[in-house]
């Protein structure tokens, strides 16, 4: 009985549904001035809470279903796509992101 209950707890904690993240695409580019840029494309049918950071600069925003954010540009030409930190999750799970701009 203990083994069966331990299996159920393990399955609930590590099931694919409980660890699933939304599908989004990162699009990298370069501005006319030579600065690296990133934008996020939401591939889901629900709104997302997103975060982009580079060298201390942080941008938090909401992303509508099936939409794309504005370009977020680095501040130095030495930065490349590896320097960007990005994160997106469902807006329903992060209600504090409702205060940030909507794209």
Image (cartoon, rainbow, N blue to C red):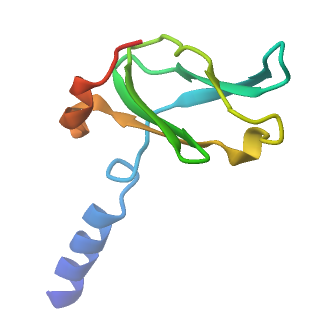
Q: How many marks?
A: 0
At horizontal 74% and vertical 46% (from top left) the residue drawn is 82
Residue 36 in the figure: left or right of residue 12 = right
Q: Nearer the viewer, residue 23 or 91?
A: 91
Please say if 24 is above or below 32: below
Name the outermost residue toward the bottom.
2
Please say if 90 is above or below 27: below
Q: Nearer the viewer, residue 64 or 3?
A: 64
Give the image location of residue 10, x and y in percent.
30, 73
Res 76 → quadrant? top right
At horizontal 55% and vertical 14% (from top left) the residue drawn is 70
Res 61 → quadrant? top left
Give the image location of residue 93, x and y in percent.
23, 39
At horizontal 27% and vertical 76% (from top left) the residue drawn is 7
Give the image location of residue 39, x and y in percent.
61, 22
Residue 57 in the figure: left or right of residue 32 = left
Q: Quadrant of the N terminus?
A: bottom left
Give the image location of residue 63, x and y in percent.
40, 19
Please say if 50 is above or below 86: above
Q: Quadrant of the C terminus?
A: top left
At horizontal 51% and vertical 31% (from top left) the residue drawn is 23
């Amino acid at each position: 009985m203990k083994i069966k209950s331990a299996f159920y707890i393990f399955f609930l904690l590590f099931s694919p549904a409980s660890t699933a993240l939304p599908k989004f695409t990162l699009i990298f580019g370069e501005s006319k001035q030579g600065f690296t840029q990133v934008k996020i494309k939401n591939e889901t049918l629900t709104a997302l809470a997103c975060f982009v950071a580079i060298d201390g600069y942080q941008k938090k925003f909401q992303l509508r279903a099936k939409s794309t954010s504005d370009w977020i540009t680095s501040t130095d030409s030495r930065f490349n796509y590896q320097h960007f930190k990005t994160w997106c999750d469902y807006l329903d799970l992060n209600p504090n992101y409702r205060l940030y701009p909507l794209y």
